Amino acid sequence: MKPIPQMETSELRRRLHNGEQVYMIDVREDEEVAAGMINGAKHIPMGEIPARLDEIPRNEEVVIICRSGGRSQHVCEFLNHQGIHNVINLKGGMLQWHEEE
């Protein structure tokens, strides 16, 4: 299997700033997202991903977000095994995103 594509937080920030519509899924837990999410991201906790596969688009890239990039990497790998190959891991996750603010 090919490696999961990675996106730098600076790239995501640039694309959003330029008005691009980027489909994002935040896989953190409820208490984590209560502290803030990237504007426009959809919240699907990691444990709910298998039951909510029908909510993940197949025809556009999907950026998967977590706290540091680890859980989102696992979600990307799981989705690849399910035949969903349009996913990108947000490298460094929300920790990196907040460091750049």
Image (cartoon, rainbow, N blue to C red):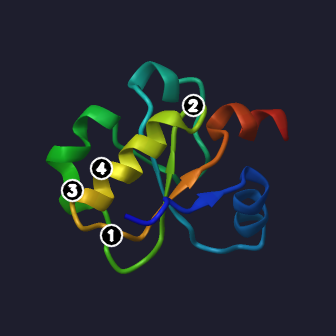
Give the CA distance from mark 3 to mark 2.
21 Å
The image shows residue 11 at horizontal and vertical percentages of 75, 62
**Mark 4 secondary-structure assignment:** helix
- The nearer-to-camera label among 2 and 4 is 4
Counting residues from the N terminus, which is met first, the one under dot 2 or under dot 4?
2
The image shows residue 31 at horizontal and vertical percentages of 45, 19
Residue labelled with disc 4: 78
Give the CA distance from mark 3 to mark 1.
9 Å
Q: Identify the amino acid type marked 3.
A: Leu
- The nearer-to-camera label among 4 and 3 is 4
> In which quadrant will I find the N terminus?
bottom left
The numbered disc on residue 36 is none
Q: Identify the amino acid type marked 4.
A: Phe
The residue depicted at 36 percent of the width and 69 percent of the height is 85
The numbered disc on residue 57 is 1
The residue depicted at 30 percent of the width and 56 percent of the height is 79
The residue depicted at 77 percent of the width and 65 percent of the height is 17
Give the CA distance from mark 1 to mark 4.
15 Å
Counting residues from the N terminus, which is met first, the one under dot 4 or under dot 3?
3
Q: Is residue 90 left or right of residue 61?
A: right
- The nearer-to-camera label among 1 and 4 is 4
Give the CA distance from mark 2 to mark 1.
22 Å
Give the CA distance from mark 2 to mark 4.
18 Å
Q: Is residue 59 left or right of residue 51?
A: right
Q: Residues within 10 Å of mark 1 (few under 14, many from 20)?
A: few
Q: How crowded is mark 4: few (under 14 residues within 10 Å), some or many (20 or more)?
A: some
Counting residues from the N terminus, which is met first, the one under dot 1 or under dot 4?
1
